[in-house]
Image (cartoon, rainbow, N blue to C red):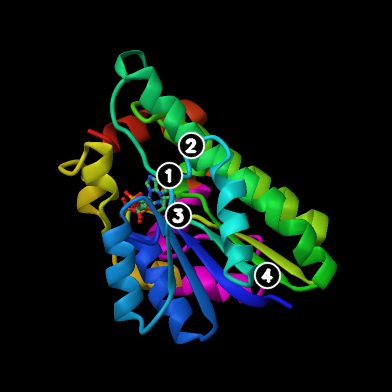
Amino acid sequence: MTRPATLVTGASAGLGAEFARQCRARGGELVLVARRRERLEALAAELGGAHAVAADLAAPGAAARLLDQVAGLGLHVETLVNNAGFGASGRFSAAPAQRLLEMIDLNVRALTELCRLALPAMLERRRGFILNVASTAAFQAGPNSAVYYAGKAYVLSLTEALHQEVKGEGVHVTALCPGPTATEFFEVAGNAGSRLAKAATDPRAVVRAGLEGLARNRAIVVPGLMNKVTAQSNRLLPRAAMRRIVAAMKA
Ligand SMILES: NC(=O)c1ccc[n+]([C@@H]2O[C@H](COP(=O)([O-])OP(=O)(O)OC[C@H]3O[C@@H](n4cnc5c(N)ncnc54)[C@H](OP(=O)(O)O)[C@@H]3O)[C@@H](O)[C@H]2O)c1
């Protein structure tokens, strides 16, 4: 018999570290995943014990290896928080192709693989929770962050579909769509001085809203009033206007 665990990807910083803290407060085993092992171990110590697994989830086969490691710890994934991800700012034509493909490997491929690998056992147990971190970027195209926005649109679409597929079978599936949040994200993306970065809000409220939405099996959670407006604005404004607004916000 394995014990149920919460698996948080991208737990070494930002939203992932906050997911780890709030999930710890709810009790149970915790598996923290990211590349920076020291950070994971420091967080595990702060939380009074958690399993730290250093892994590059953009690498081929990483998701399957990770779940093997979880099984090796005598655990099974009851709650999957697919949070690891990064963005990049700049023109598509000038971005290093390798970096864009790495983004797809992490933000899209690893997230999909983890859902696909974890879901069957959740359905068998008739108990499971999957929280996929998308973004308000999922609701419109993102000039100067084209691949990131397209990837988040994929995450939202996939998550909504899975939510509907498994409804009533004991498994909750939720997409969390944060707007700009104060994490290391903008530094990594290379636009720490942008208008979006300056509008960043507290990650604690974002994580709380995500976990509450997951508990209630909401298909989509958009935390905060401004983000709700952003998410809905594509229904009110022509797509051409949305493209210009997003391009200006990224400056
Ligand atoms: N902050 C925002 O404004 C915002 C808004 C909407 C959505 N989001 C989404 O929120 C999620 C979390 O981002 P964040 O804002 O918390 O950014 P962050 O502070 O930069 O954290 C990103 C996390 O992902 C991990 N990560 C990056 N590459 C990885 C890889 N190859 N393998 C495993 N882990 C990797 C990082 O750890 P290591 O570097 O140690 O691997 C880190 O723990 C992302 O999916 C992001 O797209 C963020």
Mark 1: is the Cβ under 8 angstroms from ligand 1? yes
Identify the mark nearer the N-term, 3 or 2. 2
Identify the residue shown where x is 27% and y is 61%: 38
Asked whether residue 168 appears in the rendered view, the answer is no
Query: Spatial distance from mark 1 to mark 4, Cα to Cα?
Result: 29 Å
The amino acid marked with disc number 2 is: Ala
The magenta-colored residue range is 208-232
10 Å crowding of disc 2: few (<14), some (14-19), many (20+): few
Name the residue type under label 3. Answer: Val
How far is mark 1 from mark 2, CA to CA?
6 Å
What x and y, as percent, mark residue 77?
63, 67
In terms of depth relative to the viewer, which is nearer, 5 or 68? 68
Q: Residues within 10 Å of mark 1 (few under 14, many from 20)?
A: some
Q: Is residue 4 above or below residue 34?
A: below
Q: Quadrant of the N terminus?
A: bottom right
Q: Viewer-nearest of labels 1 and 4? A: 1
Say whether mark 2 is within 8 Å of ligand 1.
yes
Pointer 1: what residue? 56
* Eye-nearest disc, 3 or 1: 1
Q: Which residue is mark 4?
A: 217
Residue 11 image position (x, y, % from top left) = 39, 61
